Image: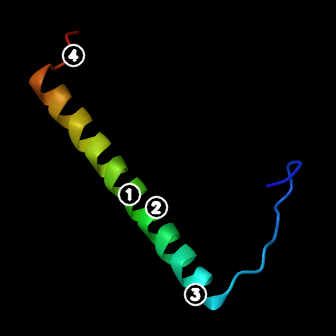
Amino acid sequence: MRAGKIAHRYVTPEQAKLLRQAIDNYRLVKKLLRAWEADSERLIDAAHPAKP
């Protein structure tokens, strides 16, 4: 982004393939981290239930 606006770039087909892989990997990592966070929270809550 430049000055708050999306900047467009032209890339070679090889660069486009690498960028697509990087984007896919990033999305997978984010998905795994969300699942890990949810599991961790569930385990912590199960081990230490809230007292009324």
Residue that numbered label 2 is attached to: 26
Residue that numbered label 3 is attached to: 14
Q: Are marks 1 and 2 in contact (CB under 8 Å)?
A: yes
Crowding at mark 3 (Cα within 10 Å: few <14, some 14-19, many 20+): few
Residue at x-position 79% and y-position 55%: 1
Residue that numbered label 1 is attached to: 29
Q: Amino acid at mark 4?
A: Ala
Residue that numbered label 4 is attached to: 50
Q: Which mark is first along the chain, 4 or 3? A: 3
Question: Does residue 17 appear to the left or right of 13 in the view shown?
Answer: left
Residue at x-position 27% and y-position 46%: 36
Q: Secondary structure at mark 1?
A: helix
Residue at x-position 22% and y-position 43%: 39
Question: Does residue 35 appear to the left or right of 30 in the view shown?
Answer: left
Q: CA distance from mark 2 to mark 4?
A: 35 Å
Q: Secondary structure at mark 3?
A: helix
Q: Are marks 1 and 3 in contact (CB under 8 Å)?
A: no
Question: Does residue 27 appear to the left or right of 40 in the view shown?
Answer: right
**Where's residue 35, x and y in %?**
30, 50
Q: Are marks 2 and 3 in contact (CB under 8 Å)?
A: no
Mark nearest the camera among 4 and 1 is 1
Q: Amino acid at mark 1?
A: Val
Q: Amino acid at mark 2?
A: Tyr
Q: CA distance from mark 2 to mark 3?
A: 19 Å
